[in-house]
Every structure is written in C-alpha cells, then in structure tokens.
Amino acid sequence: WDPTWDYSSIWKIRKRLAVSDLGELSRLFMPKEAVRKHVMSYLDDKLAKMVDSKEGLSVTVVDWDTCNRHELTFKHWNSGDFYILNGGWRPEFVVRRGLKENDEIGLYLDWDWKTSKYIFRFSVLQRTK
C-alpha cells in the first residue's frame, strides 16, 4: 500500500446506492456499461456463459475497507438487462456496513493469485451526509 498513490482510479465500477440496492431482495444492481467494459471483457467464454446462466457465477467479493471475504453470485439478469450481485449482498454488505441510499460504492475486478480466480474488490467511497 502506497499512501502517495491515488487509489480512486482503481474503482472502475462506481455507483450511488438506490433503494432497490438496499432492500430485502438482497441484490446490487451494477451499471451495465461499466460491467461490460471492466468485467465481462476480461472473462473467457466459459465464465461469461456462467454469468449469463440462471445460476450465475459464484464470486468472491473482498471488502477493501475491512478485509472481509464474501461469496456472492454475479449474474446477468435478462429480464431487465442488468448485472447484479446477490446471494448475501444485504446481510454481508448493506447491514454489516450500514449502507444507506446515496452512499457511493466502488468495485473492480481483480485476479486472486492465491486461488487463481477473478474476484471483486469493494469499497465504500463516500457516505451520504
């Protein structure tokens, strides 16, 4: 970690949370164009097909701020042409981190050398005042 480096540039997917991201359905709607550019373009055909499947792709999401690791599902939701993270989003992030409407979060896709798998890194970039 280098305190002189501008870490704000690593968060390729940025989002202000909406009510729909915080509710009981436990899913984070991800910005479609940013996901296509900064995630889907790196996945091979096999992984991309899993994202497009009904089951989705099991992914590790590492909370940059707390170093906690969580297993979620990343999938393309065809009915609305959205990408989502679900399967634990609400308890592991919304509740545990106390996320609120209009908080800004950041995500980026990273390669985990220990597991030889892609992972998402997550951070709360700005809290609503």
Image: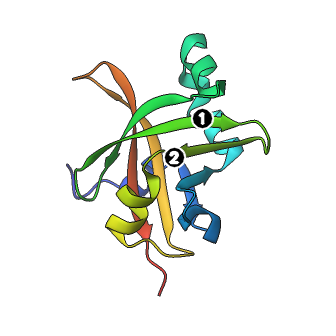
> Between disc 1 and disc 2, whose residue precedes?
1
Q: For the residue carrying disc 2, how many other residues have a C-alpha within 10 Å: few (<14), some (14-19), or many (20+)?
A: many
Q: Amino acid at mark 1?
A: Lys
Report the residue at 64% width, 28% height from top: 54
Q: Which percent across, then down, holds residue 125?
A: 42, 65
Report the residue at 36% width, 56% height from top: 92
Give the residue at the far front of this rendering: 24
Q: Which percent across, then down, holds residue 30?
A: 61, 49
Given residues 51 and 91, the one toward you in this image is: 91
Q: Which percent across, then down, holds residue 121?
A: 38, 45
Q: Amino acid at mark 2?
A: Asn
In the image, residue 84 above or below residue 110? below
In the image, residue 125 above or below residue 58? below
Residue 86 — which label? 2
Q: Which residue is mark 1?
A: 75
Q: For the residue carrying disc 1, how many other residues have a C-alpha within 10 Å: few (<14), some (14-19), or many (20+)?
A: many
